[in-house]
Image (cartoon, rainbow, N blue to C red):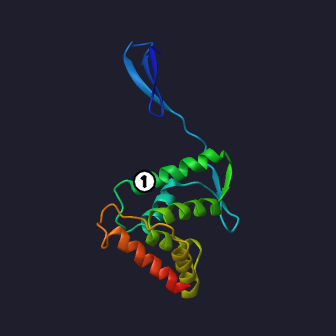
Amino acid sequence: MIDSRDVNNGIRRRRECLKCEERFTTYERFQLASPVVIKKDGRREGFSKEKLLIGLHKACEKCPLPAGTIDKMADDIEAELYDLGKAEIPSTVIGDTVMERLKKLDYIAYIRFASVYRQFTDITVLRREIDNLVTHEVEVPVSTSQLPLLPPEELAMVIEGCQMDRR
């Protein structure tokens, strides 16, 4: 080995072949062992970021989100799971984490994901979740790709009026 340097997520090494003296570069990256996900029925399977991305893409389909938002969210969730340092993680921990982040990002994506994750059996359960979302709403998420229909002051009055009607 001639030289070794830290790069992004690993180490870059310059090496030289002992026979032909040709120089080449190798890259070494740290690969953590994937945690095992404990499913609701007790089965165990390795964590799959691809499955997480598929679920997020389905939930966020046709939502006006900036490019890269879903991938960033998946990266953050994956990092959070690895930071737990546990060999086994219940699927409910992953699902709850996804729901928490989607709730802050986009209400429609949150409801889509929740309807599958919580296995809503009828419309009343779905309505209860939507009502809960509206009554506990503190701030309306603002889409970065659309202009608001109402000025912020008028929007606040409309939201406050809706909450008063529910009481």
Q: Callout 1, which amino acid? A: Asp
- Residue 65's spot in the image, x, y percent? 36, 61
Residue visible at 68% across and 52% down in the picture: 88
- Residue 117's spot in the image, x, y percent? 57, 71
Q: In this view, does 34 lie above or below 22?
A: below
Circle 1 residue: 71
- Residue 71's spot in the image, x, y percent? 42, 53
Q: Answer with left or right where residue 55 lies relative to residue 46.
A: left
Q: Is residue 54 above or below residue 31?
A: below
Q: Answer with left or right where residue 159 lies relative to residue 149.
A: right
Residue visible at 52% across and 78% down in the picture: 130
Q: Is residue 120 above or below residue 137?
A: below
Where on the picture, by quarter, is residue 95? bottom right
Residue visible at 30% across and 62% down in the picture: 145
Quarter of the image with the C terminus is: bottom right
Q: Is residue 31 above or below residue 166?
A: above
For the residue pair 15 and 22, the one nearer the viewer reads as: 15
For the residue pair 142 and 15, the one nearer the viewer reads as: 142
Q: Residue furthest right?
A: 42
- Residue 101's spot in the image, x, y percent? 51, 60
